[in-house]
Amino acid sequence: MRKSYNSGGKKILKWIIKRNKITILLLLLIIFIIAGLLDIKYEGLFFQSLPKFIQNYLVDIL
């Protein structure tokens, strides 16, 4: 019979998330902010879905 090594990995992952929950949340927040700024800078999908007057305002700022 084969042992399941996946359950050990799940325990480790849960332990890491439990111990570093705030750090992981801050890291995800920073990644989303950077992704949003890059989307605006390079006029990505989110930027194109905005109304034209907001697009013009953001282009003037950046």
Image (cartoon, rainbow, N blue to C red):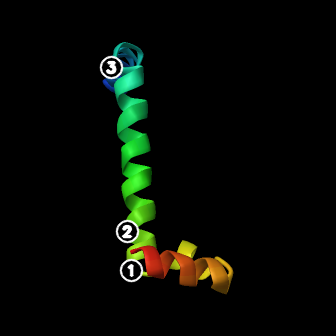
As shown in the figure, which amino acid type bears the numbered disc 2?
A: Leu
| Cα separation between marks 2 and 3 | 29 Å
Q: Residue furthest right?
A: 51
Residue 15 sits above or below residue 45 on the image: above
Would you call the spot at circle 3 few (<14 residues within 10 Å), some (14-19), or many (20 or more)? Answer: few
Circle 3 is placed at which residue position?
Answer: 16
- Identity of the residue drawn at 41% across and 23% down: 22
Q: Residue at x 56, y 72 (%)?
A: 46
Helix, strand or loop at mark 3: helix
Mark 1 vs mark 3: in front: 1
Residue designated by label 1: 42
How far is mark 2 from mark 1, CA to CA?
6 Å
Which residue is the site of mark 2? 38
* Image position, residue 10 (x, y; %): 39, 23
x, y percent for residue 12: 32, 18
Q: Dots 2 and 1: beta carbons under 8 Å?
A: yes
Q: Amino acid at mark 3?
A: Ile
The quarter of the rendered structure image containing the N terminus is: top left
Between discs 1 and 3, the one toward the N terminus: 3
Rendered location of residue 36, percent (x, y): 45, 62
